[in-house]
């Protein structure tokens, strides 16, 4: 997944080494020692140190940006569905259409019932 020289972002500090979470680093070596828990050695230019890390503590910048873009687009679609009172889009985004099909309840609910359910689930 990672290659030497890649720019990575520190996302966690599993071994409590005092890693600066959110900072950038560069992969400078792979630790192939089977007795070591660490998989990579990164260089963090901001603190000018070489630190061994596990693979779970680092992530590619492109991957983080892609996940953030998906989250933002999902939230924007949800806001649009609520603003336009588009029940079908809201159910699709919330994954509620599968639950309704499994129940096989053909009963239609009124718009007031739908808004009441949305308000119950909202974290506003």
Image (tube, grey):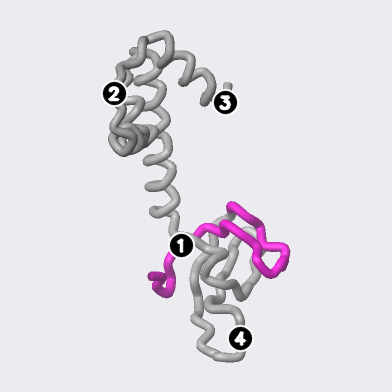
In this picture, which residue range is highlighted in magenta?
Answer: 1-22
Q: Does the magenta segment cover residue 110?
A: no
Dot 4, how many residues are within 10 Å of its Cα: few (below 14), some (14-19), or many (20+)?
few
Question: Mark 2 highlights which residue?
Answer: 88
Instruction: For marks 2 and 3, give the CA distance.
Output: 20 Å
Dot 3, how many residues are within 10 Å of its Cα: few (below 14), some (14-19), or many (20+)?
few
Tag 1–tag 2 contact (CB < 8 Å): no
Pointer 1 or 4: first along the chain: 1
Pointer 1 or 2: first along the chain: 1
Pointer 3 or 1: first along the chain: 1
Q: Quadrant of the C terminus?
A: top right
Position of residue 42 relative to residue 67, above or below, is below
Tag nearer the camera, 4 or 3: 3
Q: Quadrant of the N terminus?
A: bottom left
Question: Mark 1 highlights which residue?
Answer: 7
Instruction: For marks 1 and 2, give the CA distance.
Output: 42 Å
Q: Quadrant of residue 63?
A: bottom left
Instruction: For marks 4 and 3, give the CA distance.
Output: 44 Å
> Measured from the top left, where is residue 51 in percent x and y?
63, 73
SS class, disc 3: loop
x 44%, y 54%: residue? 61
Tag nearer the camera, 2 or 4: 2
Position of residue 17 relative to residue 73, above or below, is below
């Amino acid at each position: 997944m990672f290659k030497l020289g890649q720019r990575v972002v520190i996302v966690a500090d599993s071994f409590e080494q005092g890693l600066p979470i959110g900072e950038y680093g560069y992969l400078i070596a792979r630790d192939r020692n089977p007795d070591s828990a660490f998989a990579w050695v990164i260089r963090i230019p901001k603190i000018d140190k070489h630190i061994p890390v596990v693979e779970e503590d680092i992530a590619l910048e492109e991957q983080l940006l892609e996940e953030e873009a998906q989250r933002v687009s999902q939230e924007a679609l949800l806001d649009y569905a609520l603003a336009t009172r588009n029940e079908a889009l809201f159910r699709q985004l919330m994954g509620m259409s599968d639950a309704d099909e499994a129940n096989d309840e053909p009963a239609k609910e009124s718009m007031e019932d739908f808004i009441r359910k949305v308000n119950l689930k909202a974290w506003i």
